[in-house]
Image: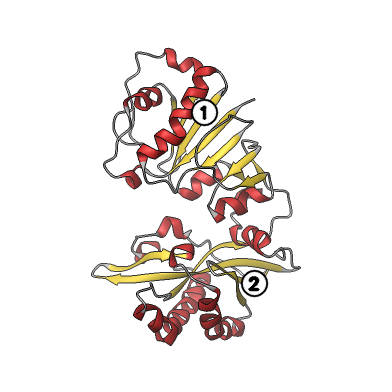
Amino acid sequence: MTSATFLLPAAARFGAQRWQQDVSRALGRADVTSLASGRRAQLVRQIELPGGTWPLAALSRQVDVGDADTPDSAWLRADPAWLRPDINGVRLMAHGDALGLTREDCDALLPALQPVFGDAGFALDAPDPARWYLRVPRASPVPEFLDPSEALGTDLADHDDDSAAARRWRALATEAQIILHNHPWNARRVAAGKTPVNALWFWGGGPLPDARVHTRSAHAQVYTEDPTLRALAASATTVAPLPKAFSAPGDAMLFDLVGERDLRRLQTDWLQPALAALARGQLRTLHIDDEDGNVLTLRRWHRLRVWRRPRIASPAATP
């Protein structure tokens, strides 16, 4: 059965941009469900993990290296990050890919950090410049850290965890920040007009799941440029790079459009072709799931709901 799911960003990512009239009318006729907001919640709606866990570090490690099943081991992402202090606190401004790190950056910074974590019994490495990992004993307590996508731009004080396990990791994070702040390589990056790496962001901890991870909606194909979704889906289905636009409908396709910031391009290249396929009967169902927690379901017969008001405001507005 032909169906497509589009994952969209939060409405705020589009600023003052507005839906075009034909798209607005079509979306106004959809069935709408309000669910949990945020990127993690959005992905959990597409990927079912054993026992409600979130072992993203182990899943992405398996994709990057293939050794996440090392006996008695769990994994934690320790991604390079840029924190910026302001008058109200300290904010996460960038992490991972956004820093544009190279292997040369990793080779310069990692040797200064590895002894800190080695003394604590953890092994730090970076098989990809944007994704750094800590291998920890499986029995070691690891707090549930906030995903960086959820923390980006926020004051870190809003996410404080006062548990004993969190205090230990906060001490390690502070020591890493001091080392990175004083590292001459960061001074060279700043002098070259680049963003410094002044912190590590811990998240996604846990062992590689024993059970097979599978997609709740049985997506036959996932198209994404996001390493997080790629890691989540890789053990369940076929994953491919995101194409330039929606074309021929297929069976149970998922398109990750969260990185899109041009609403006109989103409509021209994706929504309008998908809505046309729906009208022709080539597509049976179109699901639109945004980071604000709004899930729209469109079927061909919904075009008969002519009494429905258009979705005239923003992508996440209530119709």
> Which one is nearer the viewer's eye here, 170 or 179?
179
Give the mark nearer the N terminus: 2 vs 1: 2
Q: Is residue 247 above or below residue 65?
A: above
| Residue 30 in which image quadrant | top left
Tag 2: amino acid = Arg
- Bin the neighbour count of mark 1 within 10 Å (Cα to Cα): few under 14, some 14-19, many 20 and up: many
- Bin the neighbour count of mark 2 within 10 Å (Cα to Cα): few under 14, some 14-19, many 20 and up: many
Residue 261 lies left or right of residue 125; in this view the side is left
Residue 185 lies left or right of residue 229; in this view the side is left
Q: Secondary structure at mark 2?
A: strand
Q: Is residue 150 above or below residue 121?
A: above
Residue 17 lies left or right of residue 178; in this view the side is left
| Residue 121 in which image quadrant | bottom right
Mark 2–mark 1 Cα distance, whole angstroms, equals: 40 Å
Rendering coords of residue 99 (x, y %):
44, 67
Residue 23 lies left or right of residue 109; in this view the side is left
Q: Are marks 2 and 1 in contact (CB under 8 Å)?
A: no
Q: Return the residue at label 1.
A: 286
Residue 227 appears in the rendering:
yes
> Which one is nearer the viewer's eye here, 50 or 99?
99
Tag 1: amino acid = Leu
Rendering coords of residue 292 (x, y %):
40, 42
Q: Return the residue at label 2.
A: 135
Q: Quadrant of the N terminus?
A: top right
> Which one is nearer the viewer's eye here, 236 or 70?
236
For the point 35% across and 18% down, the residue is 308
Q: Secondary structure at mark 1?
A: strand
Rendering coords of residue 31 (x, y %):
45, 24
